[in-house]
């Protein structure tokens, strides 16, 4: 046995183990610090700084001091940083290949904080498109372009009111010239007197024989033909007047209806019913909602590598350093888990305390929800609290539920805004809830803006009216909904603000259109009234004339008949006298 | 490292058994190719110290194979991944996983398993090949090497003399 074994080698073995243990003891912190920084360089793609890493051996815990992770999209900022993090680790589970953090304490955690020096970027960010979205021109400018001012509105030469006023003017002029032309052909007073003289002459004429009667009849027929001709002219004049009257009435009605049609057209053109008010609401609430969402999204991006499994980027890591493959066991625990923890999250508006319970990403191994609770009693001079429960399924799909409430959060701009429309200050109170499943988000927050103060740099009278209307509100309720895929959810903001702005804009536009209508009508009515009155008077005169001619025509016929009857009676009397004379000669 | 190389050189040219050198190289290969902080390496290290193998050769082999291991780690990890995720072997791994020692040895780690299997497969061939090479060296090459000027210079160096004195032997 001695030939093969050297028992003194055991001492050497102990010495080597001791040397290795000493190296680990002395250099573990430095090695982990180096590993974190190198991981940042090779896998994350941007500079990661760690002030120091300390390993405590009894109980085993790791302390990371001064971690700063450069934001790949903005190297002037850190995507995340903290002053100190201490993780108490279960050594036995660690030796078995699992990371069980029994307690995690993080102080001064911050997202999107300013770096002292610009961080190095090693790999371009694949999500640079998000930055492009952030750099898009402000919605404020779009809204500025969308809300018309009164001048623009009235300078629009396609206004129906203007068109109809011109049409009425044209109709008046046309009808006037037609009436004038037919007026010239109507029988004048001289002609009427001639008629009367002729009739008198005929009435006084003596019919003593058949020749006289024939002559009278001829004269009457000539007079009747003359009157008939004038009658036709009078009928044409009557028709023309009636036609003109109808045309002018139609044009007048069209002008009266025009402002209403204009308002409809303006509404459609500028989408006053739906567009601008909604966008103003987006400016007010969307700005804050988007910033909070982006805040959450950045946190999600930091945590994403821990949640998603099997991605391409993870594959290269797997191949170079390997990974643990775990199998079913009687009492399974997740590959990594934070049993409990507390995080101090710093924000410009105040400090938020986060508590962690069973944070992991393998809920098929430990089915209870992972819970993250947030609370603060000094956030924006108000208070907030909320909790998020989530579950990650074996196919990496996440299900989550959350609710939150906030009270008396003061929102104020520390610098005066050059925005066309901005919320200067208000107090927010509200609550919300969120559900997330299979990549789809459905979040809802109901809030009140109490005593809001808005401002505008616009010189538009409308905008000033809107601001005045808004500033008079004691509270403006609003509802913010986020729905759709988590990477690009759609923001839907419903608010009483919409109605306030709509009413204000509508009232203002209506007033301007009514003013326009009154202006046109006051000018047109005067002209039109003259023309229409004159036409009606003319129509009446022509009617009277027509009646006189009808009467005269009838009288002439009667006169002729009377003359004939009179002549017949006279002839009868003559015959009677002759017969009497003859008979007296016999008796 | 220079000391270790000199030790190997001395061993090659001494009365040390070729087998001692060969197994030292093979054990060094196992510890070099596989991740250092593994349970099996504790045993390999203990064996290297307890069994009469040539320690100098062991440490040189460890260093050389650690470099090779760093380069081939992705291949080993891929092999380990393929084996651990192979459906046909799932029952085997599942049963083994219930044993704490299996997990403590990190055989459910892709790199550890892949490297250990490769090292295990290569152990006997490397040992035998090395043994043959040492014998052949001593038969055919050693005399020629000993005549080389550089070797003469090395043998005449103070360091070499000091080492022999400490070791209490000569080439």
Image (spheres, rainbow, N blue to C red):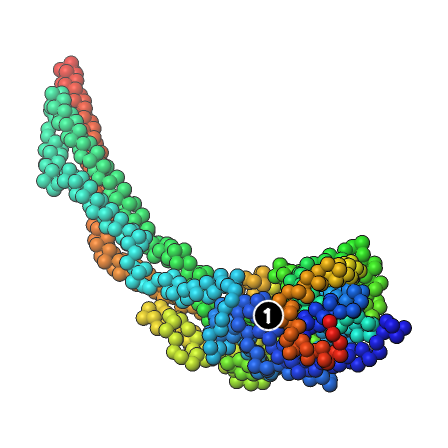
Front residue of A516/A35: it is A35
Residue depicted at x 71% and y 63%: B142
Q: Quadrant of residue A54?
A: bottom right
Residue depicted at x 65% and y 80%: A27
Q: Quadrant of residue A32?
A: bottom right
Q: Position of residue A229 (x, y in %)?
A: 18, 32
Q: Quadrant of the C terminus of chain A?
A: top left
Q: Residue furthest right?
A: A1
Residue depicted at x 31% and y 54%: A159
Residue A318 left/right relative to A527? right
On screen, residue A475 above or below B127 = below
Q: Chain of mark 1?
A: A
Residue A16 left/right relative to A206? right
Residue depicted at x 41% and y 64%: A137
For label 1, the SS is helix
Circle count:
1
Q: Residue furthest top?
A: A586
Front residue of A303/A89: it is A89
Front residue of A544/A454: it is A454
Q: Position of residue A343 (x, y in %)?
A: 62, 81
Front residue of A185/A357: it is A357
> Would you name the residue on which mark 1 appears?
A39
Q: Position of residue A276 (x, y in %)?
A: 42, 63
Q: Quadrant of residue B57?
A: bottom right
* Residue A32 shows in this picture: no
Q: Quadrant of the N terminus of chain A?
A: bottom right
Q: Residues within 10 Å of mark 1 (few under 14, many from 20)?
A: some
Q: Position of residue A427 (x, y in %)?
A: 50, 80
* Residue B161 shows in this picture: yes
């Amino acid at each position: 046995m001695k030939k093969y074994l050297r028992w003194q080698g055991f001492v050497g073995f102990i010495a080597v183990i001791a040397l290795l243990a000493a190296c680990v003891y002395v250099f573990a912190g430095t090695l982990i610090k180096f590993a974190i920084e190198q991981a940042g360089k090779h896998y994350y793609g941007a500079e990661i700084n760690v002030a120091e890493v300390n390993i405590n051996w009894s109980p085993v815990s790791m302390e990371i001091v001064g971690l700063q992770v450069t934001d790949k999209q903005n190297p002037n900022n850190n995507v995340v940083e903290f002053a100190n993090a201490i993780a108490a680790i279960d050594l036995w589970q660690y030796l078995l290949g699992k990371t069980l953090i029994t307690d995690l304490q993080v102080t001064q955690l911050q997202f999107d904080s300013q770096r002292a020096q610009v961080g190095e970027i090693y790999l371009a960010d694949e999500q640079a498109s998000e930055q492009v979205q952030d750099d898009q021109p402000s919605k404020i400018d779009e809204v500025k372009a969308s809300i018309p001012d009164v001048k623009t509105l009235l300078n629009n030469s396609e206004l129906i009111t203007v068109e109809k006023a011109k049409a009425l003017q044209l109709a008046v002029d046309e009808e006037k010239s037609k009436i004038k032309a037919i007026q010239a052909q109507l029988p004048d007073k001289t002609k009427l007197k001639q008629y009367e003289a002729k009739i008198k002459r005929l009435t006084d004429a003596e019919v003593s024989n058949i020749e006289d009667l024939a002559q009278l009849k001829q004269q009457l027929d000539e007079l009747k033909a003359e009157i008939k001709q004038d009658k036709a002219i009078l009928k044409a004049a009557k028709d023309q007047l009636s036609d003109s009257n109808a045309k002018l009435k139609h044009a007048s009605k069209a002008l009266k209806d025009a402002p209403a049609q204009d308002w409809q057209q303006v509404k459609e053109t500028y989408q006053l019913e739906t567009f601008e008010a909604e966008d103003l609401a987006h400016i007010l609430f969307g700005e804050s909602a988007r910033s909070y969402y982006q805040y959450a999204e950045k946190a999600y991006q930091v945590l994403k590598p821990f949640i998603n499994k099997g991605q391409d980027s993870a594959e290269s890591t797997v191949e170079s350093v390997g990974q643990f493959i775990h199998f079913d066991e009687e009492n399974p625990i997740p590959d990594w888990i934070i049993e409990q923890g507390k995080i101090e999250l710093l924000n410009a508006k105040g400090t938020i305390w986060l508590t962690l319970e069973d944070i992991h990403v393998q809920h098929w191994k430990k089915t209870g929800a992972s819970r993250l609770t947030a609370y603060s009693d000094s956030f924006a001079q108000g208070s907030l609290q909320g909790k998020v429960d989530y579950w990650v399924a074996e196919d990496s799909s996440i299900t989550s539920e959350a609710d939150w409430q906030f009270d008396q959060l003061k929102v104020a701009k520390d610098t005066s805004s050059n925005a066309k429309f901005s919320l200067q200050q208000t107090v927010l109170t509200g609550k919300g809830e969120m559900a997330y499943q299979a990549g789809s988000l459905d979040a809802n927050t109901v809030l009140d803006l109490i005593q809001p103060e808005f401002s505008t740099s616009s010189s538009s009278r409308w905008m000033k009216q809107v601001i005045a209307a808004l500033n008079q509100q004691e509270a403006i309720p609003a509802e913010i909904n986020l729905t759709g895929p988590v990477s690009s959810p759609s923001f839907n903001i419903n608010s009483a603000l919409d109605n306030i702005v709509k009413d204000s804009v509508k009232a203002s536009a209506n007033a301007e259109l009514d003013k326009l209508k009154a202006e046109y009508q006051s000018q047109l009515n005067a002209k039109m009234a003259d023309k229409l009155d004159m036409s009606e008077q003319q129509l009446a005169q022509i009617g009277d004339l027509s009646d006189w001619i009808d009467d005269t025509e009838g009288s002439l016929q009667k006169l002729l008949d009377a003359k004939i009857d009179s002549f017949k009676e006279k002839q009868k009397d003559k015959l009677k006298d002759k017969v009497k004379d003859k008979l007296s000669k016999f008796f | 490292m220079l000391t270790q190389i000199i030790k190997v050189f001395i061993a090659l040219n001494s009365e040390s058994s070729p087998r001692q050198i060969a197994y030292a190289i093979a054990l060094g290969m196992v510890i070099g190719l596989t991740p250092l902080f593994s349970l099996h390496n504790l045993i390999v290290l203990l064996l290297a110290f307890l069994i009469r193998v040539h320690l100098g050769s062991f440490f040189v082999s460890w260093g050389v194979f650690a470099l090779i291991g760093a380069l081939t780690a992705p291949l080993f990890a891929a092999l380990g991944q393929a084996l651990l995720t192979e459906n046909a072997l799932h029952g085997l791994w599942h049963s083994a996983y219930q044993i704490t020692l299996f997990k403590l040895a990190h055989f459910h780690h892709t790199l550890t398993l892949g490297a250990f299997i490769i090292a295990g497969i290569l152990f006997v061939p490397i040992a035998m090949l090395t043994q043959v090479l040492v014998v052949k060296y001593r038969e055919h090459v050693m005399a020629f090497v000993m005549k080389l000027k550089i070797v003469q210079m090395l043998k005449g160096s103070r360091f070499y003399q000091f080492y022999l004195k400490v070791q209490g032997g000569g080439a």
